[in-house]
Amino acid sequence: MSLMGLLFAWAGLAQTVTVVDITDLKPLAFVTIFSENPAATAITNEGGQADLRAFRSADSIQFSHVGYFDKTLSFQDIEKLNFTVRLSERAYSMKEVVISASRFEEKREDVAQAIRVISAKELAFINQQTTPDVLQNSGEVLVQKSQQGGGSPIIRGFEANKVLLVVDGVRLNNAIYRGGHLQNSITLDNTILEKAEIVFGPGSVVYGSDALGGVMHFHTKNPKLAYEEGKMHTSGQAFARYASANTELSSHIDFNLGWKKFASLTSLTYSSFDDLRQGGRRNPFYEDFGNRDFYVERFQDKDSMVVNEDPNVQVTSAYRQWDVLQKFLYQPSEQVSHILNFQYSSSSDVPRYDRLTQLSGGVPRYAEWYYGPQDRLLSSYTLKWGKGARLFDNLRLIAAYQHIEESRNDRRFRNDQLNHRIEKLDIFSLNIDFNKDINRHEIRFGLEGTYNKVNSTAFAENIVDGKTEALDTRYPDGGSTMQSVAGYITHSFEISPRWILNDGIRLSYVGLQAQFVDKTFFDFPFTEARQDHTALNGNIGMVFMPGENWRFTVIGSSGFRAPNVDDLGKVFESVPGAVVLPNPDLEPEYTYNLEAGISKTVAEKVTIGGTGYYTWYRNAITTQPGAFNGQDSILFDGVLSQVTYNTNAGEAYLYGANVYLSADVTDQFSITSTLNYTYGRIKTDSIDLPLDHIPPVFGKTSFQLKLPKFNAEFWVMYNGWKYLKDFNMLGEDNFGFATPNGMPAWMTLNLRTSYQISPNFQLQLALDNILDTNYRVFASNISAPGRNFIATLRGTF
């Protein structure tokens, strides 16, 4: 190239601005740059870059990005900054785009339902070990844990198979998602998420069965194409993390290769967690609460009860996990794209910590109790078609297959028989969604079909001589299937800039078949269970924005959940001394929800708001005492156990509220706070009884400082009392793992920081539970981490 050519190239490069985040220096795509004199507009590319030659004579150039503070500079100011502009993120924004409410992109402010969005940037900064920990850290979802390797989210008093998990448009809830405490969210790798969206309240119109309390939709990152003509785009990130409370050692790497029309994204994560140390500063009224005083070891083919030298170390809670993601993107044009998505998650054996702490007659009840490796395989194909047609503008098709394998393995103390119960599932699903814009109307409609096949086997193994024998299965031994077909249509109408109407309707069919073949262990009076259910669900909501930054919402919605194989056909011990038996006559559950919200933003910096709701709960499935062959107790696993059944309890109700505050005191310092309250009861002829899964009042208050290359947050997590009178004694509130008065209130103080050493390296340091408080989250059977020092080194390329 000639000297003159080099000079022209340099001049062009010198007028290319790069816009980055102020704290982590990451480039910001889709920043709008404009000036009035001269009239010019530009938008940054994936590398955060834009050409400013058209702005050379401008005295006022504005940089604007959703979720960030606007910045206005002259061209000369930008030259002095070496053509690098840093933007600071807002603490709260209603302008961000959400997908989970309708399966298509729309502004959050246009949706009547309450939605919490956790971005990739926030996920990296909060730096949580697992996805359940991410949800707990939001301050708006409570997460129960029965062991370290798990986490069961509770949304508005609904938990397990009454809230819906979705990843990349594919529902994770399956035929054996149980009604107690569900630990499956642990199989989602939060390190590769683009964002997580939590929709509060019934979501059955868009998502069908199970979405009674809400929907948690996790979006993994997509491969990125090359954004510069003729150049391959390569990028990636990696981190290594250590945490002291459980001697965590985690490592992650992902890398992207992108060309003009084809791109690949690969992600690998490995984590090792040692036994978890609980807090040492205890409630003076319950000084021994949560102590791990013993554990079991085997010496010369004999189990022994061993004294734990440090009762704060929760021995037999350690486990390991690994996650793999591979995505391929082929985009022949801007209107059409194809994505292949492969996800695999597995683990070591995961000890069921709560069962390993139980005593019977002064000795351990179990010598072993563990979940086998939790294997989740997902493969899906997604087609996005934006060329339009007469009946639709955009089409999205997702065809998916999942294979799930899990097992429960237990052995009584000083008993050589190890019981193995293994479940395998094959799940097929197809979603086709369309949208059509007609003037001020946005219409979305679609079809969904799912098929679940469950195979349940069991055997008992003598650990001394290796001999095996038959054992009762957890689910129907002849196999089970569950299928669903549904169609829906939703509609959004911008009546005016102040009034927006949301409405929708869905018709669903759910069928279930289960075969009970072997009657050696339980002589059930039936050999088959068959169910066919249809449900019609709807919602209607209104958003009113009268001006002066006021926003009002009201929504009425219904939800339903068809009984699955776990509800209808399982045999298991729910609480010590009680066994749940199959009930083929279960009916679907229904909810009818009414909620209203209000928010006010002052000076575009302070937002305060709240949402209140009331839910009528019909045919609620709860556990009730019963009889089997005329007996109220039977032998199960060698123990005389009370007979119980899952039954439709008739009527229940819940109500509650969430209030929140978000204040950008300055562009660098912000305060956020959220508080949640839920109350739930089952109606009876005499007195209303507590509904299980209802959390105590809980919330989070945070103070965040954002400076060039530095980010810091000090936050307080808090929970109120859950008194024993509010526990459901037959359900899943786990009163046996609380104090005699219930689950005590608690509060933790926490601090985390990040420092951008260079554009490619970042150091994160955090100290969780600074005061080393000893506590348990409601219904949890393992204590939370004590004081926890966390160090993370991140790198990008």
Image (cartoon, rainbow, N blue to C red):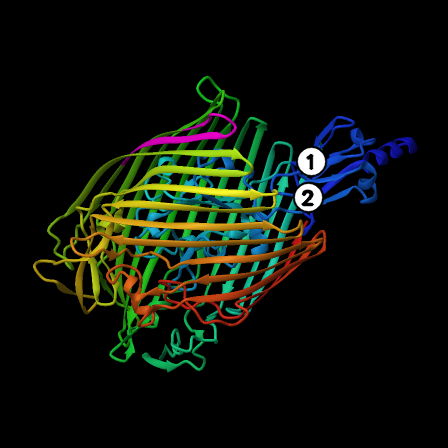
Q: Residues within 10 Å of mark 1 (few under 14, many from 20)?
A: many
Q: CA distance from mark 1 to mark 2?
A: 9 Å
465 in the magenta segment = no
125 or 386: nearer the eye?
Answer: 125
Spot occupied by residue 764 in the image (x, y as percentages of width and height): 63, 60
The quarter in which the N terminus is drawn is top right
Q: Is residue 592 left or right of residue 773?
A: left
Residue labelled with disc 2 = 27
Q: Which residue type carries mark 2?
A: Pro
Q: Which residues are magenta?
A: 491-509
Q: Residue furthest top?
A: 390
Residue 366 sits in quarter: bottom left
Judge whether 26 appears above or below 778 on screen: above
* SS for callout 2: loop
The residue tagged 1 is 44
Q: Are marks 1 and 2 in contact (CB under 8 Å)?
A: yes
Question: What secondary structure prevails in the magenta region?
Answer: strand
Where residue 439 appears, as percent x and y from the top left, is 49, 20
